[in-house]
């Protein structure tokens, strides 16, 4: 079975749509639980989740955490009960039958992987960028593509590195590639381009490329965070 872990902060507007999508596009017998880890929302996120969980056939657990996606995902991953963990962003919607696809990979010996990704926009730069997610190279990986990993492997890797306030997904995936291998499922997660719409697609893509480059030259987690705060936040 699969434990879905979703880190959130101020996602009252989107979270119900994601729950509904998971319910319509998976089989309940495959989903052990959905663990939503809140990083200190100041909107109606927690209230919305509580109300939805009371009437939903999905097993939804709400947990609290300090702000920081690495910390939130570690809390969710460490409390999960299923043999497969599936880390999903609140604005990313997995394909129909995603649970069966993940379980099939797991049974075939692939203990870590993701899906390809499409943005919910027709912006030419983002359409060009998303095309590369089909290739099984760590250069083209990111958290918006979601991530499945066996619970045993997650524990063996000591989870996400909480020094990383940003780039935590890529750092963890890079370690997986290096030590254990990785698979890319030939179906698509649909993810929101809202940050690109807010900041500008060309500008944001440029700064993300710089962050990747800085990391490849050995920049520390703090250095990456400082750059992010200066140019993106």
Image: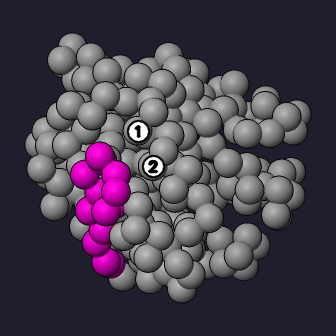
Q: Answer whether labels 2 and 1 touch (C-beta < 8 Å).
A: yes
Please report the bounds of the magenta region as a residue range.
Answer: 53-65
What residue is shown with label 2? Answer: 19
Report the label total. Answer: 2
Q: Which residue is mark 1?
A: 23
For label 2, the SS is: helix
Residue drawn at (25%, 38%), measured in percent from left and top?
31
Marks 2 and 1, Cα distance to the nearest angstrom? 6 Å
Residue at the location (12% across, 50% down)?
81
- Front one among 71 and 80: 80
Q: How many residues crowd mark 2 within 10 Å: few (<14), some (14–19), many (20+)?
A: some
Quadrant in the picture for the N terminus: top left
In the image, 25 versus 153, the foreground residue is: 25
Query: In this rendering, would 205 be left or right of 38?
Result: right
**Is residue 99 found left or right of 88 in the rendered image?**
left
Question: Where's the C terminus, which quadrant?
Answer: bottom right
Whether 198 is drawn above or below 184: the answer is below
Q: Residue at x 37, y 30 (%)?
A: 26
Q: Position of residue 5 (x, y in %)?
A: 33, 53
Q: Position of residue 57 (x, y in %)?
A: 29, 46
Q: Secondary structure at mark 1?
A: helix
Q: Quadrant of residue 36?
A: bottom left
Residue 123: image quadrant is top right
The reply to whether residue 154 is visible in this rendering is: yes
The chosen color scheme is one colour
Are there few (<14), some (14-19), or many (20+) residues within 10 Å of tag 1? some
Is 63 situated above or below 176?
A: below
Is residue 64 rendered magenta in the image?
yes
Q: Position of residue 134 (x, y in %)?
A: 57, 21
């Amino acid at each position: 079975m699969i434990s879905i872990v979703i880190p959130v902060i101020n996602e009252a507007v989107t979270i119900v749509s994601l729950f509904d999508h998971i319910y319509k596009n998976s089989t309940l017998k495959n989903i052990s639980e959905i663990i939503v880890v809140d990083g200190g929302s100041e909107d109606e996120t927690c209230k919305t989740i509580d109300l939805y969980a009371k009437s939903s056939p999905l097993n939804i657990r709400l947990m609290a955490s300090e702000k920081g996606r690495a910390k939130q995902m570690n809390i969710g991953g460490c409390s999960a009960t299923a043999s497969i963990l599936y880390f999903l962003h609140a604005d990313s919607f997995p394909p129909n039958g995603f649970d069966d696809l993940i379980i099939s990979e797991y049974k075939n010996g692939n203990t870590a992987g993701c899906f390809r990704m499409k943005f919910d926009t027709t912006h030419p730069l983002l359409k060009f960028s998303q095309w590369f997610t089909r290739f099984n190279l760590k250069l083209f990986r990111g958290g918006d593509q979601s991530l499945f990993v066996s619970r045993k492997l997650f524990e063996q890797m000591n989870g996400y590195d909480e020094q990383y306030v940003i780039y935590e997904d890529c750092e963890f995936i890079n370690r997986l590639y290096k030590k254990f291998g990785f698979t890319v499922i030939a179906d698509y997660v649909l993810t929101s381009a809202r940050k690109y719409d807010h900041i500008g697609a060309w500008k944001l893509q440029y700064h993300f490329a710089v962050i990747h480059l800085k990391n490849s030259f050995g920049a520390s987690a703090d250095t990456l965070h400082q750059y992010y705060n200066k140019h993106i936040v």
